[in-house]
Image (cartoon, rainbow, N blue to C red):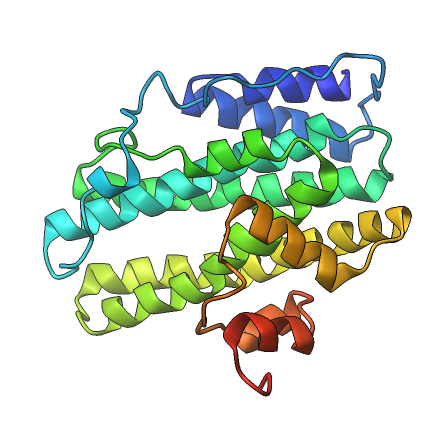
Amino acid sequence: MLFFSEIYSILITTSADEKLKKFNLFYNDFKDNNISFDNHSDVQTLMTPSYIEFCSIVLPKEQKKRKYLDTIEGKKHLLHTITHIEYSAIDLALDACYRFRNMPLEFYQDWLEVADDEVRHFTMLRGLMDELGVKYGDFGVHTNLFEAMQKTPVLLERMAIVPRYLEANGLEQNPKIMEKLHSNPDEFNQKIIKALEVILDEEIDHVRKGDRWFKFECDRLGLDYQKTYFEILEKHYPGSTQKEQNLNFQARKEAGFSCDELKTLSKKTDCK
């Protein structure tokens, strides 16, 4: 089986069930060393997200707010939003494997591990949605993560923006959602909390992998980690390094962020 050709085939698969099935077969072959790297194949750019055939695209401001987690409707919208993030993250991890060629084997191992985690997260959340009688695609979704993928075709920027910025933001958002769920402590919310605990723990590892390969590329290019990271953030998300942020210092330090970075981003004088 040819590595990049098969990854691309999985990426453009427009059925969620088929995508997961194809990935699982591919990943088993990869772990069994039944894969050849076809570095000669051209890199294609995805023009539309793979979920476009079964999801209605809306602007982020048009999405239903998930304030009322003591209602079935609120739970449905919350789960659908998170499930969409996890599904999008499958493609982001696969695209990293597909797009960036001639990298050390460990790079592909890392991002296939991330894709495998995201597949498991998606499956877990979809199971919870099934219990509520809602399916992925029943509500409108945004394309923020797909757009981030399109805007970062260069390894250095991809590692800075996707794992080290967008996924790192989940290290703060996830605990906030869990806190809201704890304030509405019914039996089903406890199930959601357990799922989010798994996701949070594994998100730290995903950000750490992004940190590893961001610094790998900085070292290769002779660039300063912090200066380069902030420059890339400001390029894609102007003002993101200027505002005060309430960060999950412990999780971010575990994921590879330096104290200087955390102090700059949080506008605090220490990183405790």
Query: Which residue is depicted at the point 65% across and 70% down?
Result: 261
Total residue callouts: 0
Image quadrant assignment for residue 125: top left
For this orientation, the residue located farthest to the top is: 41
Query: Which residue is depicted at the point 56% across and 22% down?
Result: 11
Query: Which residue is depicted at the point 47% across and 38% down?
Result: 145
Q: Nearer the viewer, residue 236 or 145?
A: 236
**Image coords of residue 119 (percent x, y):** 51, 39
Residue 69 vertical placement versus 236 (above, below): below
Q: Nearer the viewer, residue 260 or 55?
A: 260
- On the question of residue 163 being in view, the answer is no
**Image coords of residue 214 (percent x, y):** 74, 51
Q: Quadrant of the N terminus?
A: top right
**Image coords of residue 123 (percent x, y):** 42, 40
Describe residue 53's horizontal placement relative to residue 159 as left or right.
Answer: left
Query: Which residue is depicted at the point 30% across and 32% down?
Result: 136
Q: Quadrant of the C terminus?
A: bottom right
